Amino acid sequence: MSKEEFRRFGHELIDWVAEYLEHVEDLPVLAQIEPGDLKAQLPVAPPETGEPMEQIIADVDRLIVPALTHWNHPSFFAYFATSTSAPGIFGELLSAAFDNKAMLWRTSPASTELEEVTLDWLRQMMGLDAGMTGIIYDTASVSSMHAIAAAREGVELRIREEGMSGRKDLPLLRVYVSEQSHSSIEKGVITLGLGQRGLRKIPTDSEFRMDSKALGAAIAEDKQNGIVPFCVVATVGTTSTSSIDPVAEIIPICERYMMWLHVDAAYAGSAAVVPELRYILKGCERADSLAVNPHKWLFTPFDLSVLYCRHLNLLRRAFSLVPEYLRTPEQEQVRSGSDYGVQLGRRFRALKLWMIIRYFGHEGLAARIREHCRLAKLFAAWIEGDPNWELMAPVPLGLVCFRACPAIDWIDDDVRNARLDVLNEAIMHGVNATGKALLSHTKLNGKLTLRLSIGNIRTTEKHVRQVWDLLNEQLKLLGRQS
Ligand SMILES: Cc1ncc(COP(=O)(O)O)c(C=O)c1O
């Protein structure tokens, strides 16, 4: 592509993105298509010859946009609401232009060194101690899997060298999580060959936090049975309710049994940049590692997850492998990303986070997260003030768990709950079908629960009021029918 053409299409696309972000609110949040609709409109074979850029861009409008679910829509309240931001988009643009593969320090000194500095900034903003060193991965699933791998390396059972299969000398190794932990931890355990038997789920208390007494008892019992407990994964900000495991109670247990404590703070970790919310990381000053996702609540385009780790030497021991063709004269002086994980080449992800932190500043990031938490509390207050609705979990941050509970003459509790499940699911689908807002759900104590997550940089009180109105409209409509 000539420089002139590149400029023309580049300007056109930046204009396109500016309009898209300005008017994303006018688009349906949830893609209004049926499975297979997009595929049916695409040629099955690749073009034999190149096509004009105009046509390709036109097809983005015609085919791709209608098949998008718009995470940038300010009324996206599902899962954990996230959004990109202008400096983040510029960071992605530049990193695509540089196309560096940060496998070794010398293949991208900028990426390697900027990552170290930017992650140290984030560490300071979150109030983590200087013993925690950060490394970037794509997702929290991968960050946590690497933490568990480092923990396993610390057990000194020569698993790196001899593997786990066919070994009679190897006891069952076990990782502990709460019943509310994210499925990614179980997947990590499976990936590392520890098997689902290698994971024990600990019950939670009435506020969905890991029961630390039950944890201690489970570990003691397993040890008596010859199992080797080696890692606890606590969650700060669970996926269903954003509950915060009592890390300060869990840490002495880990220390007593010499176990690794990893903290999955994928969602909530970002909230620690707000000084008055730092308490959520209480106890983490003694954790061995912690994962946080700037792509969740720090306005960073997907993907960018950070693993903070106190024992980078173990992570390196688990993963470093330097064949002759990767040997460099400076390798003992520098950090090379490929030594700390399964990937060789790594994207230049630090650039976007560096630009975001510089553009918003610590204060700007904290102010936005603080506002999201205020909006969540406001919505929770509306729920609490209306007998037709009930809160299903505490609201420590930006997530509200709730359900409709209209007073109708039900036969008994089981029937009532079953009817309420159906009603709430219908309310959620009804709201989502309007295209004006998107909610998701979970189950808490066997009850279908709606989740409203506020984390999008463009969400204001107006959008929260709108979804409240939509919910009440649906309740009126469906409550009458049920
Ligand atoms: C607590 C928690 N951990 C881990 C994950 C997985 O995140 P990722 O998509 O970055 O792997 C999520 C996703 O929502 C989460 O809520």
Image (tube, rainbow, N blue to C red):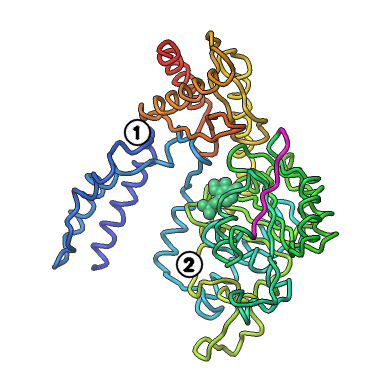
- Dot 1 falls on a residue whose secondary structure is loop
Instruction: Specify the segment rendered in magenta.
Output: 198-206
Q: Position of residue 125 (x, y in %)?
A: 69, 52
> Which residue, given by chain and number where applicable, does mark 1 sit on?
28
Q: Position of residue 37 (x, y in %)?
A: 23, 44
Q: Residue 417: within the magenta?
A: no
> Which residue, given by chain and number where applicable, does mark 2 sit on?
347
For the point 26% across and 49% down, the residue is 60
Mark closest to the chain's N terminus, 2 or 1:
1
- Dot 2 falls on a residue whose secondary structure is loop
Mark 1 belongs to which amino acid? Pro
Q: Left or right: where does residue 452 sit relative to residue 232?
A: left
Is residue 360 in view from this perspective?
no
**Mark 2 burial class by Cα count in 10 Å: few <14, some 14-19, many 20+:** many
Q: Position of residue 287 (x, y in %)?
A: 76, 57
Q: Residue furthest top?
A: 409
